[in-house]
Amino acid sequence: MTNLKINVKMFDELLPEGISIPSSTLISGPGGTGKPLVEFAFAAAWLKAGGSLIGIPLQYPGGELLITAMKKLYNLDLTDYHGKIVYVQFDINTGSYEKTSSNTLKANLLKPEVWDGIFKTAESMFDKTGSGTMVFGSALNLLLFSKTYKDSMLNKLKDALQHDKSRTYVFAVSTSAFADEIKVLEDASDNLMFTRMGKPMKLFLRIDRMKEVAFSAEEKEVPISVETLRELNEIAEITRKTRIPEIKKI
């Protein structure tokens, strides 16, 4: 695979050639602007194209919500892809990481040295066929609330976006806090996209730059219902309110 076509009308209008593989994509924007919902489109296309997926959605507590969102938004049943997707659940009380099921790892993602281990372990859990690995992570800015690990985690995320071409990365981050640090990640990524939320609760996407493919810089509304946006944003907000105070103590 050299390019990944999304095969969703709005995305194909913006990205007629798809995205270059391997590459790193950062979806940036204020909190509550639906960044993971855009990210899910790339993850769904990757699985349909035969790739394997490592999912690190920090603001969603488990794989069940991801399964529901993928089916509702992109008509993809993740249960059909057993052996192709591994979920990584964030647990600050875990010393390092551990396998908790055939498709789930629990990991203390605040520790940069844990990341290499979870990627290698996750890839060992995949079926031995496919078109490579995509790592998608959302709300990764939450990790920057740790005073102990903030700088090292920023460097780890930057390095993945800028230098690791053994996998394809799609990350989503909020600019509502740590704007200067998020700018470092924006500059490090191959592909950069921005989301915003208009009224009444409409999600918009704009592409700023892409690696080696043509794209449209026109801002477009992402066709996601108000009900779905509200439901997923409410869950994400509950998680943020729980997670941030915990992470600030570390």
Image (tube, rainbow, N blue to C red):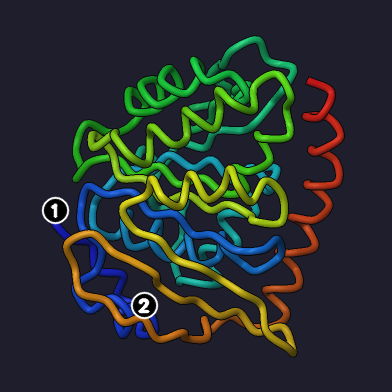
User: First in sequence: mark 2 or mark 1?
Assistant: 1
* Residue 63 visible in this rendered orientation of the protein: no
**Residue matched to label 2:** 11
Secondary structure under tag 1 reads loop
Q: What is the quadrant of residue 124 in the picture?
A: top left
Q: Which mark is residue 1?
A: 1
Residue 129, percent from left and from top: 19, 37
Residue 163, percent from left and from top: 29, 34
Amino acid under disc 1: Met
Q: State left or right for residue 115 relative to residue 230.
A: left
> Could you classify mark 2 by the number of other residues whose Cα lies within 10 Å: few (under 14), some (14-19), or many (20 or more)?
many
Secondary structure under tag 2 reads helix
Q: What is the quadrant of residue 192 in the picture?
A: bottom left
Q: State left or right for residue 13 relative to residue 226.
A: left
CB atoms of marks 2 and 1 within 8 Å: no
For the residues labelled 2 and 1, the Cα–Cα distance comes to 18 Å
In depth, the one of 112 and 46 nearer the eye is: 112
Amino acid under disc 2: Phe
Q: What is the quadrant of residue 15 in the picture?
A: bottom left
Which residue in the rendered view is the most extreme toward the bottom?
200
User: How many badges with numbers are in the image?
Assistant: 2
Residue 180, percent from left and from top: 60, 47
Which residue in the rendered view is the most extreme toward the top?
95
* Residue 141 visible in this rendered orientation of the protein: yes
